[in-house]
Amino acid sequence: MGYTVGEKILLAHAPGAKSIAPGDFIMAKVDFCFGNDITAPIAIQEFKKLGKKKVFNQKRIALIPDHFLPAKDMRSANQAAVLKKFAKEYGIVNYFEIGEMGVEHALLPERGLILPGDLVVGADSHTCTHGALGAFTTGVGSTDLAYAMATGQCWFKVPETIKLVFKGRTRKWVCGKDLILHAIGDLGVAGARYKSLEITGDTIDQLPMDDRFTMCNMAIEAGAKNGIICADKTTESYVKKAVRKYKQQRKAYKVYKSDEDAVYADVREYNTSKLEPVVASPHLPSNALPISELKNIKINQAVIGSCTNGRISDLKQAAAVLKNRKVDPNTRLIIIPATQAIYKEAVQEGYAETFIKAGAVFCTPSCGPCLGGHMGILSEGEVAIATTNRNFVGRMGHPKSFVYLSNPAIAAASAVKGKVAHPADL
C-alpha cells in the first residue's frame, strides 16, 4: 500500500517510525514554526514556564506581529512588544517589524523560509497556506507552539486524505479563489474535518503560485488539517528565486509525490472549464454560488487583501478592473497588500496610483479587517464583499453585519457598481 504526499512527509519527520497509517499518533521533528501578535504572547508565556535557556533553533522560528500593527490601541501595542522583547532575548532571527513585515502566510514563503517537503506548525489556523509549496503545514495552539519552539518537535495524529482533482482550463476572471470556494461549497465547512486536502489535476498544473497559496489557505474552511499541492517546476522556480533573493542558508529540500496506489478517504473531481466566478454568501464559506445567481446585493464596503488574496497578482487583477473607473460614492474600497515587498511592487507597477485615482484606500500590510481587527470594521447592518477567507457572524465587525467572499476582480467590480457585480457588468 502506497502513501500520499502528506503521509510521506510525516513519516520522514518521525524518528524511528518505519510506517504510519491514518489515525496513528506520532511525535515528529518540525522544520519551522511561527506565531503572530495574537497567538505568540501566550506561547511565549508557556515557553518561559518550561525553564528553557534557549530555543531549538534561532533561525527556524518566526514571530510576525501582523494582526494589529500599526497598533490600534494600547493592548495591541503591548502584545507586539512581547514578541519584540522575546525575539531580542532569545536571538530569534526571523522577527519582522513594521517596514519589512507582512501577513505571515504571504511573508514566509516570499522570504524563502518554508521549502518543499518541510513539516511546519504555526499558531494560526491558516498555516495550511504553505502547503502550496509541497510542504505539510498546519495550525496549532499556542501551547503546542511553545513546545515546538523549545524542542523542535510536535505531536500529530496522521490524517486521512481527501483528493480534489480539478480538470479543464478556467474561464476569464476565474482563479484559485473560485476553485476552492466551489470545492468548499461541495464539501461543506466540516466535510474535510481533520483530513488532509490533496489538491491536484491539470487545472492546478496551470495555476501560478499565488493561486495555489489561495487554495491551500482555505483548506481549513472545509475543516481540513492541511491543504497540500505536490511541488512541481512552478513551485521550485518560486522557491529558488525566494531563497536566492533573501540569501537564505537553507537551500536543500526534498520533493515528495503521492504513490499511485495511495489510499484516499474520498476523491472528488471538478470540471473547471464551465465554472464561473464564485461568491460565498453570509455566514459560511460553504454558501458558495455562481455570481450569476446573486442579484442586486448592495454593499457598503469592499476589501481586497489578506493572507488569501493580498499578493501582487491579486492587486494586478483588481487594478485591471479599476483602471479609469471610480468607486461607487456610497461604497468604501480598502486595499491591503500582504507584504511590504508587494506594497512596493504595487507602487512601482502603477497599481497604487490606479487604486487611489479610483477612490480606494491603499493601506500598509496588515490582517486588518479580515478578523474584525481594524482598518475597516463593519457597523450594524453593513454589507461587505471581501477577498478574505471567512464570513462568519461578526467576523468583520458587528454581529448584524454581512460579508460575501469573492476573488479580487469581483470585489473590485462590486466596489465600482456599489453592489455584487462581475467585471463584465462594467
Image: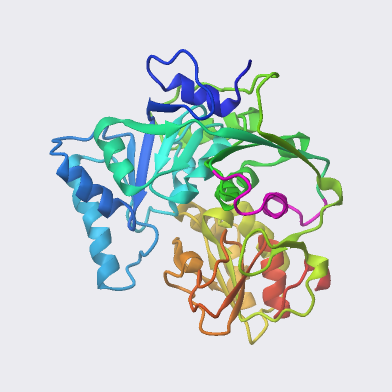
Q: Determine if residue 322 is in view.
A: no
The spot of residue 336 in percent (x, y) is 52, 64
- Which one is nearer the viewer's eye here, 184 or 135? 184
In which quadrant of the rendered view does residue 79 lie?
A: bottom left
| Above or below 268: residue 320 | below
Left or right position of 39 against 370: left
**From the image, which quarter does the C terminus lie in?**
bottom right
Does the magenta segment cover residue 192?
Answer: yes
The spot of residue 385 in percent (x, y) is 63, 71
**From the image, which quarter does the N terminus lie in?**
top right
- Which one is nearer the viewer's eye here, 319 or 222? 222
* Residue at horizontal 56 percent and vertical 49 percent from the top: 223
* Residue at horizontal 52 percent and vertical 29 percent from the top: 116
Does the magenta segment cover residue 249?
Answer: no
- Region in magenta: 171-193
Left or right position of 105 against 2: left
Instruction: Report the residue that reaches farthest toward the bottom.
Output: 330
The tally of labels here is: 0
Instruction: Report the residue that reaches farthest toward the front.
Output: 23
The spot of residue 318 in percent (x, y) is 66, 63
| Above or below 323: residue 389 | above
* Residue at horizontal 46 percent and vertical 19 percent from the top: 12
